[in-house]
Image: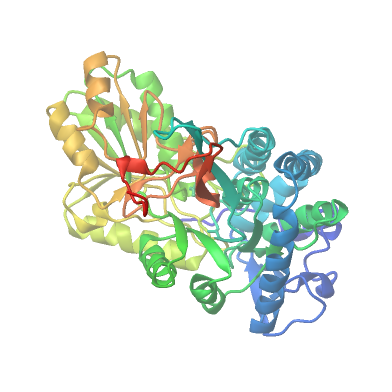
Amino acid sequence: MPAVRTTPVAAVDSAGLLAELRLAGNNPGALYGADVEAPGAGHFSSENPAGGNVLAEIGRASIYDYERVIESAVQAAARLGALPAPARGELVRRIAVRLREQKPLLAMLVSIEVGKIRSEGAGEIQEMIDIADFAVGLARQFGGRTLASERPSHRLFEQWHPLGVVGVITAFNFPAAVWAWNAFIALVCGNAVVWKPSPKAPLVALAVHRIVAAEAAAAGMPGVFGLLLSDEALLGQRMAGDTRIALLSFTGSSAVGKTVAQSVAARMGRSLLECSGNNAVIVAPDADLELVAPAVLFGAVGTAGQRCTSTRRLIVHETLYEPLLARLARAYARVRIGDPLDAATLLGPLIDAHARDLFRAAIAEVCAAGGEIVFGGRHLDGPGYFVQPTLVRAHADWPVVRRETFAPILYAMSYRDTEEAIALNNAVEQGLSSSIFTRDIATAEAFLSARGSDCGIANVNCGTSGAEIGAAFGGEKATGGGREAGSDAWKSYMRRQAVTINWGRELPLAQGVHFSLDD
Ligand code: UN1
């Protein structure tokens, strides 16, 4: 396949973007991994996936940097926890103002560093703003339940306190928003936050960190946001084993998530996991294909298939199987592949050469198993890591269909009855997102019932990806069980305390127990 043309990063730089963020080696002193004066442990590179060129050399945080960042977070957490929650909300409100101002710049940086198309880069920053606004409101709504005590003149209630330091390890695909889900909620809950972003997206992390750290310092709360940049596993492992980190939030593969969970559990810490998905769309016989086609296109091809919520499996009623595949093939053929900064592009690059290799390996494996490619299947010549949007007739049992490949590959299969479709939806290790297209209330309700989808997200007549921040986000089984962002996900970032106050003159015991020296 011919190579795609991309906007040279130098052209963007001459427009002042990178210079304004003091990146791209203009000011090497600004790029050290723990945001300190001197690097301790060498460098690693940030690469532009659309061009394959190096954007910046990043100083790797050392073990000494790690100690300094964690210790200052411990001290900052003590100060922050003493601040009333609405005052913590005020800090997040100020951050949201700055994010609104910087949205175009940050969005473009997301596009340059991880290859999201412009609209999705903007959506990423909007998701940060949305969760910030949510956190500001939440800061005035923390409440514990008051319960009916069985004892006279007793009051029984629950209250919530901050945990201390929350660690957040994020993936490249949502290089800012997923951190914000965790960080802004953790902050209004009264915790300091130490962030270890993906080594594939350090510039986005640095830019975000600059903004939030400046606002925290201006609010008299320096140190509440810590940043550790490294391309080595060591610091993440250290975070997992570090008793000073009360909660460790991890976003990434199920395989790594499992080791993180084990290390954190070994010290009786808490982990919050948001791991792999293998999300399916079920298309019922009465589905409206006018809705299905764009939903599947966005779910499977959007973000180059690199969302944990991306649609990877298409489970179609046998009566609609051929017409839908034909329709999708026509849509796939019209997808513009190329420079994520070009407004006409729908499909940007995969994140790196390794991701492209995994795409190629999955295509080879599905073809060897007997899969039939309906559209795509090929990668484009460099520079950059572009692949075609790919639609394959496949079988639910094949190992390649059962694992998550972070690429725009959609495996299609047909079914006969709703029970079978739901069984196929649930027949994978992962349990993040799912959706069904139907106008039939019984079919929809079967999908939503306890015997329906086993995923953390179950949608009707909209796709698997692109959730709002309002509901709790996360999934079951190998996805890890964590819930982040909206609803009552804040409870993960606090410790609950049950309180009984006896305001009477007697000491009655619960459960009618008598324990007295007098009779
Ligand atoms: C992820 O891919 O890690 O629901 C998060 C969505 C986005 C978040 C995805 N709001 O697709």
Q: Is residue 224 visible?
A: no
Question: Which is nearer the eye, 511 or 318?
Answer: 511
Total marks shown come to: 0
* Colour treatment of the image: rainbow
The residue nearer to you, when weighing 12 against 436, is 436
Q: Nearer the viewer, residue 256 or 30?
A: 256
Decide: is 106 above or below 458.
below
Residue appearing at x 53%, y 76% in the figure: 238
* In the displayed structure image, the side of residue 317 where residue 310 appears, left or right: right
Q: Is residue 340 left or right of residue 97?
A: left
Residue appearing at x 18%, y 54% in the figure:
398
Question: Would you identify the image quadrant in which residue 79 lies?
Answer: bottom right
**Can you say whether 94 is above or below 54 in the image?**
above
Q: Is there any visible trace of residue 270 in the rendered image?
A: yes
Q: Position of residue 1 (x, y in %)?
A: 45, 56
Q: Position of residue 213 (x, y in %)?
A: 78, 57
At a point 56% along the width and 76% down the height, the residue shown is 235
The residue nearer to you, when weighing 163 against 475, is: 163
The answer to whether 7 appears left or right of 499 in the picture is right
Most distant residue in the front direction? 519
Q: Position of residue 377 (x, y in %)?
A: 35, 52
Which percent across, then down, holds residue 494?
55, 50
| Looking at the image, residue 222 lies above or below residue 25 | above
